[in-house]
Amino acid sequence: MTKEKKLSLRLGLLAGITSLALLASTAGSLAWYAFSRTVSLSFVGTSVATSSLLNVGLVDTSEGEPYFSDADLVTYNLEREEATEGTETKIIYWSKSRTGISLLALRHYLEQSPYAVDKLHPVTTGSREALNDTDPFRLFRSPEVSETEFDHEATLDSYSVLPLAFRVINEDQEYVESKNIWLTNAAVDAENGVENSVRIFVDGASELLIKPSDNENHVGETKVGGVLSIGPGEYYDYGNDNKEYCYGEFETPKSSITYSALEESEYDVLDNMNGVVNPSEQTTFYAKHHPGVLVPDIEGAIPKVQKHYGIGKVKPSVSSEGEFYIDSDPTNGHGVPIATTTTDSKIAYATFTIFVEGWDHSIIDQNAGYSFNLDLNFEIDRI
C-alpha cells in the first residue's frame, strides 16, 4: 500500500540551519511509517540589534570519550569549551568560522550519540498538557496490530535530539548574561499536509511542546485515541472477539467502552471514525468496517489529546522600542523564551527533540514520499 516516494525535510534555523532528508520505507505490520534522514547544522548569526550577535553550539552529552577528539576538532574546524554552571561542567563545540557547524561535523556528532542518524520513526507523546504538565516528557513507539496500549517507550534511535548552546556577544565582544533566546517564527513549506506531523519538544528555560506548522496564538490538540487500520487489508483492525480495537488513550476506561452492530448497508463502506479532515481515500485513520464486526462508540469514549503550543503562543510581544516581553494579555500572544544566558558561563541551553507524531492524520501511506521544509528563527533581546 505504501507508495515508493522520497520524503525530504529541511529544518533551517536563522541562528543555526539544520537540513534533514527523509526517505520513506514500508513499516510492515507496525503502525505508521519509518523514515530515513540526514542532518546538517550551520551557524549564520542573527541579531535584533546591530550591537549583538548570537552563536549556536553543540553540547557534548557523552558519558565516556568526547564526541570530537582533538583530531576531529581540526577536521571539522571546531573549538571545544568547558563551561561550568555551579558544580556541573559541560563540553560545548563552537564553530571557529562564521560559516558555522558543517553537515559533516553534525553528522559525526549524531553518529556518536545514541539518537537517530539515518532513520526517524513516527512516535507519540501520548496525552499531555502543553502548558502545565509536570510528568517527564516521554516518547512511545508506534503499536503493532492489536497492541492497543501505548506503554512501550520508543528506542532512542527513533527520534533526533540536539542539545544546543547559545551565547550573545555585544559590540565590545563580551558575552552577555541574562539574555533571553526566543523562537520567533517557524515557517513550514510542505505538500499534502505532511508538515502537520512534525513536533519539537524544547527543554530549556521552559518545557515547550511545539507544532511548528501551527502559527496560531493558542494551545492546539491532537487526539491520541481511535480505531486504526494498521494491519493488512482495507478494514479497521478487529480481534477474535469480533470487536474493533480501540488504540491509544481514552477518557473512558476501555473495559467500559460500548460496542454495537451496524446496519448491513453501513459495512464495507469508508467510515470516518477519527475525525479526519476532508477524507478522500482510505488511510490508516479512514477505513471500512468489516461486515459483522462490532463498532465502538468512539464519540462517547472521548479520545484523550496531546496538547501543543502554536507558534503564536511562543513568540514574544514586541514593544515600540523593539524590546521582547511576555504579554500578560493572552490575546496578544504569550511569549515564552526557550533559553536564557546564565550568570556563570553566560551561555544559554536548550535541548531540541525532533520527532514525527504518529497520531497526526497526515502520517498515511499516500503522503509517504512528499517533501516539506521547516525554518525556525531564533532571536535575542536588544542589549
Image (cartoon, rainbow, N blue to C red):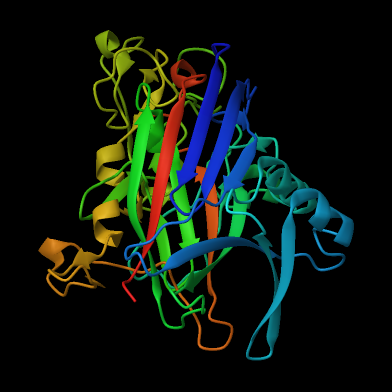
Which residue is nearer to you in this view: 244 or 119? Answer: 119
Q: Is residue 346 visible?
A: yes
- Figure check: 310 above or below 2: below
- Figure check: 91 above or below 315: below
Q: Exactly how many numbered labels are in the figure?
A: 0
Q: Residue at x 46, y 20 (%)?
A: 370
Q: Residue at x 25, y 46 (%)?
A: 215
Q: Is residue 326 left or right of residue 332?
A: right
Q: Is residue 146 visible?
A: no
Which residue is nearer to you in this view: 295 or 67? Answer: 67
**Quadrant of the rendered structure where residue 325 is?**
bottom left
Q: Is residue 221 left or right of residue 57?
A: left
Q: Is residue 335 left or right of residue 255?
A: left
**Quadrant of the rendered structure where residue 144 is?**
top right
Which residue is nearer to you in this view: 244 or 187? Answer: 187
Q: Position of residue 49 (x, y in %)?
A: 32, 66
Q: Residue at x 61, y 42 (%)?
A: 40
Q: Position of residue 287 (x, y in %)?
A: 39, 18
- Figure check: 175 above or below 210: below
- Figure check: 164 above or below 297: below
Which residue is nearer to you in this view: 316 or 144? Answer: 316
Q: Which of the image's four quarters has the C terminus?
A: bottom left
